[in-house]
Amino acid sequence: MRKYVISIMSPFLLSVATAPALAQDKYKDFGFIGAGLAIGKSVFSHQGTKAGVEPYLFYNSEHGFIDGSLFTYNPIPFIGLSGNLRFAEVSEDFNDIPSGINNRDSNGELGITLGTVGARLTYLLDVTNEQNGYEIQLHFGRAFDTPITDFVLSPYVEIDYRDKKLSRHLYSVSAQESSASGLAEFNADETWVYKGGVIALYDFSENWLAISAVALEHHDIDSPLVQNDLGWEFSLGAIYKF
């Protein structure tokens, strides 16, 4: 059984290295911060759609980048030292998880990134002793100028590999949780996660942009915690560029 979700953990996934020249020049030494309204359905939620507030954070320069919760510093070109805050995917704070399932806490990660913000391979290891696992992310994105002035579209795809320790932390159902929730007991193995989406940006003033994003995420695991085959999320907001 395959599972799907929409995710906006990385709200602005632009390709700087592989984008057309105009889009590439536009997003050098570029950053923004902002927020928007979001609606969607998490893959872990046992209820319907849920509305919320979506933060946006992005920065890109020759010295590194910030893409959502992923921070990378490049001491030399195309090789970066990375840090990441992994938010609790299975948690009542973010999703309507089934009753009787314990929250999985957030954790901090360190690692290395090869490539650029839009074409990168990232290795991240838990350094907070929460689950002691690792994830490998392969990400590709590209920014496209459109016939509409100041309107840019940026589709992206990403494939993540989660090792057994990380997967067991997120997807396993213990005997105690099984008894409390009614879900089947489950012991997770390695997991693949597939992501994709499109971000739209429109400059409506010198420092302000409108942003809209849709993203998809598929968890290739049979865990009973993954409640929905297909989840989705759409967000619309405003960002201040600097």
Image (cartoon, rainbow, N blue to C red):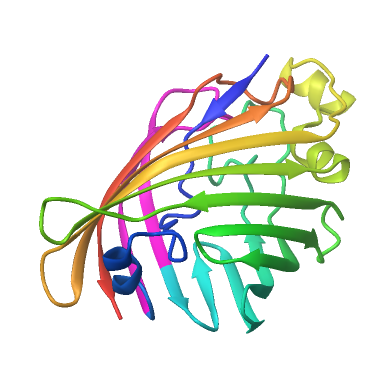
The percent position of residue 158, horizontal first and vertical second, equals 57, 44
Stretch in magenta: 30-57
Q: Position of residue 178 (x, y in %)?
A: 81, 21
Q: Quadrant of the C terminus?
A: bottom left
Place residue 57 in its image quadrant: bottom left
In the displayed structure, would residue 43 be above or below residue 110?
A: above
Q: Position of residue 126 (x, y in %)?
A: 80, 60
- Left or right of 20 in this view: 2: right
Is residue 47 shown above or below 137? above
Check the picture and name the quadrant holding the N terminus: top right
| Spot occupied by residue 17 in the image (x, y as percentages of width and height) | 47, 65
Question: Does 51 appear in magenta?
Answer: yes
Asked whether 219 or 35 is in front, the reply is 219
Of residues 113 and 238, the one drawn nearer to the viewer in this rendering:
113
Q: Residue at x 32, y 60 (%)?
A: 35
In the image, taking residue 138 as reference, residue 15 lies left or right, namely left
Q: In front here: 5 or 49?
A: 5
Q: Is residue 15 left or right of residue 77?
A: left
Name the residue rendered at 33%, 60% in the picture. 20
Residue drawn at x 71%, y 28% is: 100
Task: Give me the residue at 42% from left, 55% from top.
Answer: 11
Q: Is residue 112 magenta?
A: no
Secondary structure that dominates the magenta span: strand
- Quadrant of residue 209 within the rendered picture: bottom left
- Residue 145 figure quarter: bottom left
In the image, residue 71 sits, relative to residue 76, either above or below, namely above
